[in-house]
Image: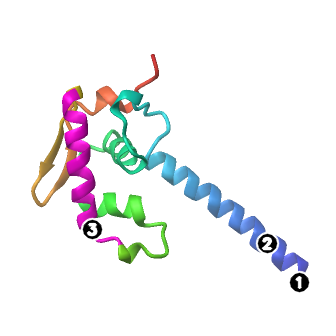
Amino acid sequence: MDEIIQAQKAEIDFLRERVRQLEDALMPSSVIIPIEWNLPRCEARLFSMLTQRDTLTKQTLHLALYGDRYDAHDYPVELVESHMSKLRKRLLPFGVEIRCQRFVGYSLKNRLNYAGRQSA
């Protein structure tokens, strides 16, 4: 019985590490968001994700924000639109442009300027 428990603990540890790696690939901690942008956690995650891909669909963003929640079905995909609208308005004064392509997804203009951003 102890062997089974140890094997399960090892598998849980492995899976937790894998999830951490996948989250970091999608939303890397290397993206430094200036404090003056005053982004809430959810919007900061969206911005980080936008720096990593040319275009992200609404469904991909939704999955990244809520996919790990047991109650993810309680969060409609339309919430992404709301978060993106707020993020776009918040970043516009700083010259950051988020584009929305109907039926395609969202993209960040000049995303490579932000992708590997280091603190100054």
Q: Residue 72, how many percent across, how many down?
A: 41, 72
Q: Is mark 3 in CB contact (under 8 Å) with mark 2?
A: no
Q: Position of residue 20 (x, y in %)?
A: 57, 53
How many discs mark residues in the rendered view?
A: 3
- The residue at 37%/76% (across/down) is 74
Which residue extends farthest top?
A: 120
Instruction: Report how far apart the C-alphas of labels 3 and 1 lie in the structure.
Output: 43 Å
On the image, the x and y values in percent for residue 96 come to 22, 32
User: What amino acid type is highlighted by mark number 3?
Assistant: Val
Left or right: where 16 falls relative to 115:
right
- Name the residue carrying label 2: 7
Q: Which residue is mark 3?
A: 77
Q: Earlier in the sequence, mark 3 or mark 2?
A: 2
Residue furthest to the right in view is 2
The disc, 2 or 1, on the residue closer to the chain's N-terminal end is: 1
Q: Amino acid at mark 1?
A: Met
Toward the viewer: 7 or 16? Answer: 16
Give the number of the disc on residue 85: none
Compared to residue 62, the image places residue 71 above or below, namely below
Query: Which residue range is magenta in the image?
Result: 75-93
What residue appears at the point 48 percent right and 69 percent down from the top-left corner? 69
In front of the other: 1 or 41: 41
Residue 1 marker: 1
